Image: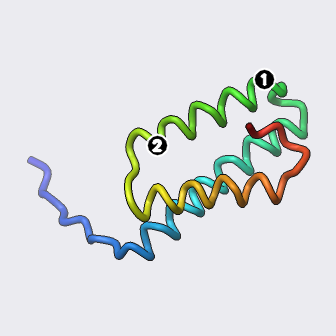
Amino acid sequence: MVPSIAVAQLSEEQEYTLSLGLTAGSLKTVCVFHQEGVLSEQQTKDYAIGYLESIKEREKGASLAGAMRGYETAKKQHPSCPLP
C-alpha cells in the first residue's frame, strides 16, 4: 500500500508563475527543435496548437492566465518560430 502524500496548495501567484514558466519553456524547446531542423514548420505549428488547446481545456484562473502569458513570452523571444 502506498501512503498518501498531501499536495501543497499553491497560491494564485505561484500557479500563474509556474504555468507561465512551463508553457514558455515547452514552446521554447519546440522552437529550438524547429530552428535545428528536428521539427518542420507544420510540426511546430501543430504542436503549439495542440498544446494550447490542451491548456485551455484543463486550466482555469491564474493557471490559464499564466499559460497564455507564457505563450506570448515564447512568441516574443522566438519571433522566427512559427507559433500560431
Q: Residue furthest left?
A: 1
The residue tagged 2 is 56
Instruction: Give the residue displayed 74% in from the left and 37% down from the top.
Output: 84
Relative to 49, does residue 79 appear above or below in the rendering?
below
What residue is disc 1 on? 42
Q: Amino acid at mark 1?
A: Gln
Numbered circle sitting on residue 11: none
- Quarter of the image for residue 72 reads bottom right
* Above or below 31: residue 42: above
- Left/right placement of residue 45 relative to residue 55 reads right
Mark 1 nearby-residue class (10 Å; few <14, some 14–19, many ≥20): few
Compare residues 30 and 64 and report the one nearer the observer.
Answer: 64
Residue 49 appears at what percent x and percent y?
63, 33
Q: Position of residue 17 (x, y in %)?
A: 52, 70
Q: Nearer the viewer, residue 76 or 25?
A: 76
For mark 1, give the secondary structure: helix
At mark 2, the secondary structure is helix
Q: Is residue 67 above or below residue 7?
A: above
Mark 1 and mark 2: span between their CA atoms? 21 Å
Q: How many marks?
A: 2
Residue type at mark 2 is: Lys
